[in-house]
Image: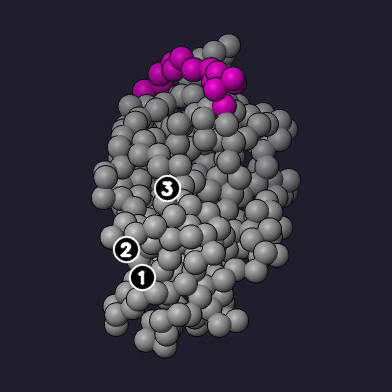
Amino acid sequence: MIDNKIQIGPIDTIFLLGGGKIVSELIQRINDDMSKTIKVISSPRHLKEIHNDQSFADFLSKKNINYLSIESMNDSKLKNFIKHNDNNFYLSIGAAWIFKKQHIDGLFHNKLLNLHSTRLPQNRGGGGFSWQILTKNRFGFCTIHMVDEGIDTGDIVFCNEFLYPAHCRIPSDYEKFYIPNNVNSIMKFISLHEKKSNTIKLIKQTEYFSSYWPRLNTDLNSWIDWSIDYNHLETFICAFDDPYLGAKTYLNHKPVYLKKCMVNNQDGIFHSYQSGIIYRKTDKWLCVSANGGGIIIEEVTNEKGESILEDIVVGDRFVTPHEKINESKLRVKYTSTGIK
């Protein structure tokens, strides 16, 4: 990197750091469209994640991808695995490690890039689609930026903006558009620099526009606060819908998960004390009172993932203990092996 520019290409070996569905899809596309060597640097947490009924480790093995599992960027095996040359392309996608200056300089020679799925410098951090649903953000991004010692603070190299359609309501809806849009954008970027060296002018992030949102965990952060406005309640439950377990609460002293929620303005205005009461039900959905209005819930499951809709009686109430609500607002931190 020279001043506010970076030299990329030609590309011989593509290094992907991290894991997840988008890495798997990207590997498939590179294999189909390009004759490039792919190497993956991943973590124990990512390698055991299941996608399409197989772990990420099994996927890499079946695709004959050379990969390295590490818990820290200080792992002694890294330098030999990378064998840096100027034609290596390094892209981090959901990587689990903290990158320090000695790693960025010594291992990746100031050419480590990162993929971010929202607008920068707004919306730095994790939490992905859940935050987008909570804030009603319809703008999708494929942002590739330089990795520095901050969190998503490096200069921007490439950016492609797109819209999530109006019918997207839950994380799995967003994912269906996020993955192909980002894979296509990354493939376009790699193709531009695949065969020749190009100088790219970097775009500095404007710090006073910045905001940061921490990572979320469904098991810890999805407890429902029944005192919030019914419109906010709908978006909260939607934010933890598929592919996650669902938003959590208690019914008859047992934890349950709620999915497939929508606002119901048909039945009038409710007092906040009525929140959580199931006032009407069919064999397919529940009508639940909330602060200011009603919601409809189509899926209620127990901790085993079994539907308990038929067991629910009109007059039952969903309740979340205050201690659970307070705990749900604690910050979750991840390491390369899981939740810290």
Which image quadrant is residue 267 in?
bottom left
Marks 1 and 2 sit apart, C-alpha to C-alpha, by 9 Å
Q: Residues within 10 Å of mark 3 (few under 14, many from 20)?
A: many
**Relative to 292, does residue 102 appear above or below in the rendering?**
above
Taking the spot 36% from the left edge, 70% from the top edge, the residue there is 287
Pick out the residue farthest to the bottom.
311
Image quarter where the N terminus lies is top right
User: Looking at the image, is mark 1 or mark 2 earlier in the sequence?
Assistant: 2
- From the viewer's perspective, is the residue at label 2 or at label 3 nearer? 2
Q: What amino acid type should be assigned to the residue bearing mark 3?
A: Ile
Circle on res. 133: 3
The reply to whether the C-beta atoms of the residues labelled 1 and 2 are less than 8 Å apart is yes
Quick one: 335 or 54, which is closer to the camera? 335
Q: Position of residue 172 (x, y in %)?
A: 36, 57
Residue 235 disc label: none
Residue 240: x %, y % from top left: 47, 59
Name the residue rendered at 52%, 41% in the picture. Answer: 92
Q: Secondary structure at mark 3?
A: helix
Q: Is residue 258 visible?
A: yes
The numbered mark at residue 267 is 2
Q: Mark 1 to mark 3: distance in Å?
A: 22 Å
- Confirm whether the magenta stretch covers residue 199: yes
Which contiguous range is marked in magenta?
A: 194-210
Residue at which label 1 appears: 287
